[in-house]
Image (spheres, helix red, strand yellow):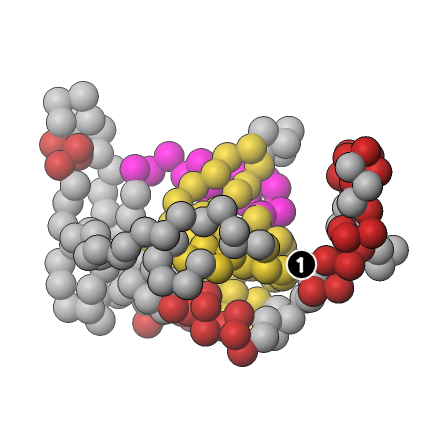
Amino acid sequence: MTGDSFYNDGARALQDQFDSRRMADRLDVVRRTEFTDDDRAFIEGAVYFFLATADAAGAPDCSFKGGPAGFVRVTGASELAFPDLDGNGMFKSLGNVVVNPSVGLLFIALHGAPKRLRVNGVARIDRDDPLLASTVGAQMIVRVEAKAIFPNCPRYIPTLELGEMSPYTPEPGVDPVEPAWKGFDVFKDHVHPRQPTFKG
């Protein structure tokens, strides 16, 4: 242990019950706060990741974020950025970030060589971020300052095959496709307007 709060009392209690504290401390040596070249390649090659957030009271939420390869960028030694693309307008994840900026990101390769990378950090949202001018389909940019970057054992990742990208994935110079659900009777009179975005 490095003297900080990476492992809480609950984790420590379970480590002691299963006699895994020594391994947990050993695994902690791979934790870092700056991205490596391999981290950057993996993150910027990802076409999806999972985002965990919590509200001010600690109630959790987890969401899938997807886009073209490169939609997540490593923008500094300890910073990454990703776009908020048009969605259903609930803003569950980003609403949580507004009131509780602590986030967890899971990058996982479910195709090809299995791999997992976790990034825990502090997020902020900017509607005027300079990256908006070069990010197709973005209505906001989320930047995350990494506090802990660490790989995870990939042993339980199934071997899947990556098919084709979603037809809703933003592409330069292409008007976005509207999802069918926006035309359903229960929603069609309540659909919010699309925000102006960079089209490339």
Q: Which residue is mark 1?
A: 148
Q: Residue at x 36, y 52 (%)?
A: 159
Quarter-wise, where is residue 55 in the image? top right
Q: Is residue 84 left or right of residue 163?
A: right
Against 121, is 39 above or below? below
**Camera-side residue of 131 and 180:** 180
Can residue 157 be found in the magenta stretch? Answer: no
- In the rendered image, residue 78, in percent from the top left (x then y), is placed at 62, 69
Q: How many marks?
A: 1
Q: Please indicate, yes or no, whether residue 132 appears anywhere in the rendered image.
A: no
Q: Is residue 71 left or right of residue 102?
A: left
Q: Residue at x 32, y 72 (%)?
A: 134
- In the rendered image, residue 139, in percent from the top left (x then y), is placed at 34, 55
Q: Amino acid at mark 1?
A: Ala
Instruction: Please provide the residue range marked out in magenta.
Output: 88-103
Can residue 97 be found in the magenta stretch? Answer: yes
